[in-house]
Image (spheres, grey):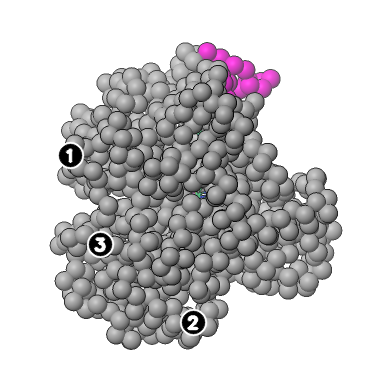
Amino acid sequence: MLESVPEEGMTRRDFFNWASRWGASVLVGGALFDNQWVKLFREPDALEARAADRWVYSTCCFCAVGCAVWLGVRDGQVVAVKGVADYPVNKGYLCVKGIYQYKVIHTGNRATRPLVRGPAGFSPVSWDAAIELVAGRFMEVVNAHGPHALAIYHCSQLLLEEYYAIAKLARGGIGTKNLDANSRLCLSSVAQGYLRSFGADGPPGNYDDIEHADCILMIGTNTAEQHPILFYRLRRAKQDRNPAVILVDPRRTPTAEIADYHLAIRGGTDAAFLNAIIHVLINENLVDYDFVKAHTTGFDSLARSVKDFPPEMAADITGIPAETIRGAALVYGRAKAALTLWMVGVNQSTSGTRQVNLINNLSLLTGNIGRRGTGPFSISGQCSSMSVREAGSSTALPGGRHFDSKKDREELAALWNVPVERIPDREGPVTTDLWEEMADGRIKALWIIASNPVVSMPDAGRFRELMSKLDLLVVQDCYADTETASMAHVILPGAMWSEKTGTFTNSERRVNMVKKAVEPPGEALPDWEIVTLIGRKMGYGALMNFRSSEEIFEEWRRVSQGTVVDMSGMTHERIERLRGIRWPCPSPESEGTARLYTDLRFNTPHGKARLIPGVYKGPAEDVDEEYPLHLLTGRVLQLWQTNTKTRNVDELMSEVPAPFVEIAPQDARRLGVVDWEEVKVVSRRGSIRVRAWVTDRVPPGHVFVPFHFGQAPANWLTIRRLDPYSHQPALKSAAVRVEKPSGREQP
Ligand SMILES: Nc1nc2c(c(=O)[nH]1)N[C@H]1C(S)=C(S)[C@@H](COP(=O)(O)OP(=O)(O)OC[C@H]3O[C@@H](n4cnc5c(=O)[nH]c(N)nc54)[C@H](O)[C@@H]3O)O[C@H]1N2
Ligand SMILES: Nc1nc2c(c(=O)[nH]1)N[C@H]1C(S)=C(S)[C@@H](COP(=O)(O)OP(=O)(O)OC[C@H]3O[C@@H](n4cnc5c(=O)[nH]c(N)nc54)[C@H](O)[C@@H]3O)O[C@H]1N2
Ligand code: SF4
Ligand SMILES: [Mo]
């Protein structure tokens, strides 16, 4: 069992300063958003900005809100960032991460040369030698053990063009089924859920809907911290039009500031809540039967599935009073335009896909789709996580083509001029299935492009153990010292955002430009180029004939033509000029599509959307006497993912000085734990030492640990239990106990 080492550093007094500052700035959202963070960042850091001698158009490298930025460049370095004032998403505003993002580029820990591990550690080699070595070993594995023995795993912060190149090499060249992205941990339940309900993946609406909704139901999203500019828009909408806002989250996060009702749901029980809402909608005659009849199938079986699920029953499970559930259903059901927003609090569950389908059902039952202010809107996570879903390197084939459609596979094979048999006819095995495949030796080589799974995977301690058994681990990252890179046999240095040109698609399907502003450090190369070089060396030169990312985009336009994500009418030039274009954009005249399904025809054979029951099955791991607390995991405003980028930014790091656990005052008292005391959080998988933040942000019976910290990884505690449809892991539910490090057990 893994145990993290104690943290040194901040004193208790520092902590109180920090907690009170953070408490004031984050919890009192008004101060935060109007005064300290957003308005402040309408302008760049004045000193640095004056020094910039040119400004390059781009998109923020962090979250999927997708704010457009100007990168201020001087002497070959990005020295400042400011928002693009005429960009419809952020209108010139940036959040705190956005404004400091130039500090993640020119750092001392960047990967600058290919490195190969030898008996005495890593030594630099030339690109020729590195490509020869990697491609040669990959071919050996493929020839000896078949294509599936080589697995490829990447993040969702690369360019759309890069995902397409990876997908083409993996699916059309190598023919491995083992290609996946970290969106498996993030949005795969959304992709499955949209596909099952509407016949295609993709959020129906857009951000403007926030400004037109009468009711906004927010589930499992801490928008204030994780999508701050979107929250700013929500906050403005709340002030201007006063829609009813219902927030469903066990924690009282800063997002609760705009909520009329904060429903502190017990972790892992959203399906029960949603079934009860549907029960009330049906019983109170709030269903739009004309809509249901004309545009959906499956009403009778859905109605049967919730018949015996009244709010009283959900109240016992969720901890939300029955009257509150009924009230929320009435507010939602009576709204003229009702919108749902959700994020990984819903998706990272063994019921993730079912919960997405239940959310979709709410819109379908009440006719809240295809028009302004409505729809089930899944916010996405990283800057280009939508691009992954489009380009086909995770949950679908390129263009949202279906694995199980012979027609789709034939079409793709013809476009690529490869035998159709090479293209997998079903999804997976996927990344979260790798454990078994690695344990029994089916996977010999793993190529990780831009991900840090040693910190981000569920039950990460076990994953680390399995990784150490691989014959070959190649890690391609922009930093040389990530926890995962340190385990590699070969490290390939990737150029990062601002050092290469391409596109990102944001949560509302808006494709925007990401432009090269500076040269990569040392010998680092754009990821598409590394993938192309390796592909060519492996013998797939005919497929991997790209000379620039513009060329890849040109090919991608053709490949996407006629699909749900059609980008054939986009060019890099048009995208920048129009300030982003939302797909589908099927012709050079098209300015994109604001909303899907406005004609109420869905992508199913009969054109109707499917109402799909979602039975409540309980959280992934129940609490018990030994492990009595429900562990919630997630994020904080200042830090990004496994913190490889943000740890380079002092302004952000100083705001979150050490790994911590949020624990409710009642639980802390019972354990005799005081603020900032070091405690152990223990699960059946491992234990970590962190500081205790005693706060009523988290309800009794629950604790919250951010997953950012490699030195105390929340994922040593989490469990690898998967959603049956999407294979997304339940990263938000585990049973833990909190102990004093002396070993005194919880009473
Ligand atoms: N600052 C910052 N911003 C980010 C990121 C980052 O690392 N840092 N990462 C980006 C990425 S990749 C993603 S996916 C998004 C994630 O964005 P969010 O989903 O908003 O972020 P999380 O903090 O992971 O989880 C959101 C909330 O889910 C709640 N929750 C936990 N369990 C449950 C449950 O069972 N039911 C309900 N209803 N709620 C639950 C948690 O209390 C938490 O407040 O953020 C993106 N933006
Ligand atoms: N317990 C718990 N675990 C979680 C979550 C949770 O809420 N709770 N959330 C999950 C979610 S939603 C996500 S998205 C995952 C994220 O998990 P990871 O995929 O591990 O996320 P990152 O830390 O963003 O890793 C991206 C890596 O790519 C590198 N990189 C960035 N840009 C580039 C580039 O252009 N080129 C190259 N070559 N490298 C680059 C970065 O340095 C970093 O090492 O974590 C998941 N894990
Ligand atoms: S809200 Fe997201 S996209 Fe916008 S500046 Fe902040 S991190 Fe970047
Ligand atoms: Mo994510």
| Three-letter code for the amino acid on which mark 1 is drawn | Glu
Structural distance between the alpha carbons of marks 3 and 1: 23 Å
Q: Are marks 1 and 2 in contact (CB under 8 Å)?
A: no
Q: Bounds of the magenta span?
A: 111-126
Structural distance between the alpha carbons of marks 1 and 2: 49 Å
How packed is label 3: few (under 14 Cα within 10 Å), some, or many (20 or more)? some
What percent of the width, then of the height, locates residue 320? 53, 79
Compared with 584, 364 (above or below) is below
Structural distance between the alpha carbons of marks 3 and 2: 29 Å
Q: Is mark 2 within 8 Å of ligand 1?
A: no
Residue 332 falls in image quadrant: bottom left
Residue at position x 56%, y 72% in the image: 264
Residue at position x 51%, y 23% in the image: 53
**What quarter of the picture does the C terminus occupy?**
bottom right
Q: Nearer the viewer, residue 728 or 538?
A: 728
Q: Earlier in the sequence, mark 3 or mark 1?
A: 3
- Residue beneath disc 1: 589
Q: Earlier in the sequence, mark 1 or mark 2?
A: 2
Q: Nearer the viewer, residue 140 or 304?
A: 304
- Residue beneath disc 3: 370
| Three-letter code for the amino acid on which mark 2 is drawn | Thr
Callout 3: helix, strand or loop? loop
Q: Earlier in the sequence, mark 3 or mark 2?
A: 2
Residue 632 falls in image quadrant: bottom right
The answer to whether any part of residue 579 appears in the image is yes
Compared with 199, 565 (above or below) is above
What percent of the width, then of the height, locates residue 400? 28, 46
> Number of labelled discs?
3
User: What number is the disc on residue 324?
Assistant: 2
